[in-house]
Image (cartoon, rainbow, N blue to C red):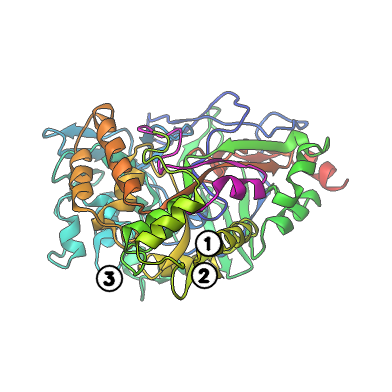
Amino acid sequence: MRKIKQKAALGLALTLIAGVVLTGCGTTSTPTAATTSSAATTTSTTPQRGGIFANWMKDDPKSLDPAHDGDTQSYDVQMNIYDGLLMFDKTGQKVVPDLATSMPVVSNNGLTYTFQLRQGVKFHNGDPFTADDVVYSFNRLAAKNTASEGEAYYSAIKGMDDVFAGKATSVAGVVKKGEYTVEFDLTAPSRTFLDVIAMPYAFIVDKKYTSGLANQSDLSAHPIGTGPFKFVEWNKGQDIKLVRNDNYFLKDANGQQLPYLNGITWSLGYDTPVAFLKFKNGQQDYSWIPTSDFVTTLNDPKLKPDIESLVQNDYWYFAANNKVAPFNKLKVRQALEYGIDKDAILKLINNRGVVANEILPPNMPAYKANPAGYTYDVAKAKQLLSEAGYPNGLPGTYPIIYRQSQITDTIMANIQAQLATLGIKVTLQAVPFPEYLNVVTQGKGILLLGHWAQDYPDPDDFLNVLFNTAQIPSNNIVEYSNPNVDKQLNALGTQQDLQKAIPGYQAVEKQIMEDAAVVPLYHDQVSYVVQPWVHNAELHSVYPYFYYLTMWIDQNAKQAGAGK
């Protein structure tokens, strides 16, 4: 998933406490969600109902329509409005039931998955949830006029790509078998099928409501789902407000209705420095720590107890469109690999990361450090440019597009200076996140700063999604194409045993790096602060959102703390 907000694929927070058992009304399914407390204790340890969690985002989300939920800012909101058949548990490594009552029955040599659905679940407008909504949601996802960036994730479903290509009007592989039973038929066994079913693109929408909209784009402005919170309003550039869904289908282990919070509000339009100031003034319940305040915050006895640190399964990268001259020349791209000092970049952001000379992050299966053997070597970079026909550097000036933030501005100014030493002149185009996505997912970026983090714990999510020719341009935004790599990736995706596939993925990554498709920069390590009155406030291990379902606020502690 493209996660250039303040990143993603986050590891568990530091302090774990006992899990909260969630029970569904009218079902014996009991998915467990591990929770954590804030780093600082408050006067109560018993979950309380009430309170609005004060959140923030720099930019507006791209969309509140699941079919276009390809970024974490959209997902942070959408995961509270909608549910899928499955979801990731709090470890980020295991898929568990959500709108399904249990994990599906797998038959027909791994080609058929049969889901039983929860009964008695209602959408926010009162419409009942049934198998018709599931079938409709996947047909809508596949429809060409929906133009979902995530359709390719579901290509294993029989007929999905035919609908997207306009060759069929309905997805043959999603079949209603009863009011609360749905069958999925695949074209080939898929190791990652259940993982992608847990992704936000597969959230279920209300067939009756959504099909009746005058324009399908209206769903983003007026979303309705079955999730724990209901949409209230989205004032572009100002705020997004959700309130508790009192009819949500999950309860805690003591039978108390979830969620605990009265609602969530995201304030929009400002970056980390302002968010941090609002946090210190008690106006906001969490913030990232700005680069300029990082050292002093770590040593601040008042703030130190509220700090959480997380390691991310992600990578930041600098890249050129592999099809656009002169970057379609291998030696030009390889010059970029040798010509960027990644240690210098990390020093500018308080060394909050690990240098990346590879695509896969350290905690991802198949990780292997620096498979192509690149090092920082300016002389080597200039030699490669000369061999490519550019002894005096590249002619002309090239734009670099990136999502604007305090950190990315700092990084890009440094990269601009480093490229100048190689004889490569660039201009910086800092834009809001939605605009960035609109450009790069159409293959219109010439040079770019990119970021990707784990959707699911499998190297397929990085290597196949980002570098398969079939993913151009929606996910393969650098337009890299190697038929041999495509062949290997397609074959590896059908290998049911991940351990057996790992050597193949390592070979593929080595080839992609030797082709200099991208220049990995670093893997993230982030720190953030949470108010001491907020409980169960850790970021999820896959996506950079809080697990709002079991979060709660100590009202007395908040009043006392905010008054100081």
What is the CA distance from the residue labelled 3 to the residue labelled 1?
A: 41 Å
Can residue 2 be seen in the rendering of this structure? no
Of the two numbered discs 3 and 1 on the same chain, state the one appearing first in sequence: 3
Residue corresponding to mark 3: 145
Write the start and end of the magenta stretch as one range. Answer: 339-367
Quarter location, residue 421? bottom right
* Residue 453, percent from left and from top: 45, 46
Quarter location, residue 161? bottom left
Residue 419 is labelled as 1
Label 3: element kind:
loop
Can residue 421 be seen in the rendering of this structure? yes
The disc labelled 1 sits on which kind of residue? Leu
The C terminus lies in quadrant: top right
Residue corresponding to mark 2: 425
Query: Is residue 564 shown left or right of residue 416?
Result: right
Instruction: Name the mark nearer the viewer: 2 or 3.
Output: 2
Of the two numbered discs 1 and 2 on the same chain, state the one appearing first in sequence: 1
The crowding category of the residue bearing disc 2, from other C-alpha atoms within 10 Å (few below 14, some 14 to 19, many at least 20), is some
Depth check: give the residue in front, 487 or 324: 324
The answer to whether residue 558 is above or below residue 394 is above
Depth check: give the residue in front, 147 or 324: 324
